[in-house]
Amino acid sequence: MRYVRQAGSDPAFLLKALGEAGGELQRAFYGIPERELQREAGHPDEGWCLLAIPYHVKEVERGVQEQLSTILTSRRPEIRNVDFDDIPFREDFIEEDVEELLEEFHYLRRRSTYLLWDIDERDWNRTGEHPYRGQVSVLQLAREMYQHDLEHLWQARRMMDALAAGTTR
């Protein structure tokens, strides 16, 4: 008997959602003036500006892609930590072009989803040893990527709404 999986546990659902995230982020940022991208956010997004979001998701994507590759290609994979909650330093992204950041994220995400499309059901349960969390599976990483996408899409929307209402610093 097949059990009902909770949302975010079905590999087919995760692949679809992960594949759509790059386009969603690009649409969300379309046409925003550069000065608005660099304006610091107020509560609850202190420490962030809109330009930090595509930089951050790109960096997280690069790290998770490395984790996935390590798990899927190593016999005893040890994966490095990727900080999903890291707020990037302004000097790391302030000179970046938002379209280039979004394109790079989109490219990296496409590579991640191609990697996941090529695995079988057994590979979704393969694990790597995380330095702080212990055993982490491919399915857990994909679910975390999906959740991370949602959090930052909502954050971008919240920040854009605040800009439109004139409630930023």
Image (spheres, rainbow, N blue to C red):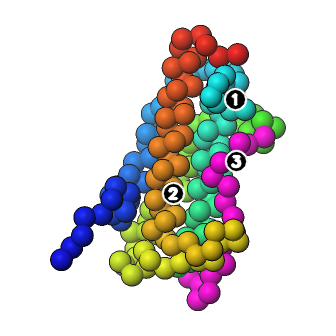
Q: Amino acid at mark 3?
A: Asp
Q: Which residues are magenta?
A: 73-89
Determine which quarter of the picture holds residue 48.
Answer: top right
Looking at the image, residue 22 sits to the left or right of residue 91; the answer is left
Residue located beneath label 3 in the image: 86
Q: Is residue 81 found inside the magenta-colored segment of the image? A: yes
- The quadrant of the picture occupied by the N terminus is bottom left
What residue sits 58% from the left and 17% below the top? 163
Find out whether the residues at labels 2 and 3 contact each other: C-beta distance under 8 Å.
no
Q: Position of residue 165 (x, y in %)?
A: 54, 11
Q: Earlier in the sequence, mark 2 or mark 3?
A: 3
On the question of residue 34 being in view, the answer is no
Res. 46 mark? 1
Label 2: few (<14), some (14–19) or many (≥20) C-alpha neighbours in 10 Å = some
Q: Amino acid at mark 1?
A: Glu
Q: Is residue 126 above or below residue 42?
A: below
- Secondary element under disc 2, as helix, strand or loop, is helix
Q: Is residue 67 above or below residue 6?
A: below
Residue located beneath label 2 in the image: 144
The CA span between labels 2 and 3 is 14 Å
**Front-most of 31 and 43?**
43
Q: Amino acid at mark 2?
A: Glu
The image shows a total of numbered marks equal to: 3
- The quadrant of the picture occupied by the C terminus is top right
What residue sits 63% from the left and 74% below the top? 134
Q: Position of residue 6 (x, y in %)?
A: 33, 59
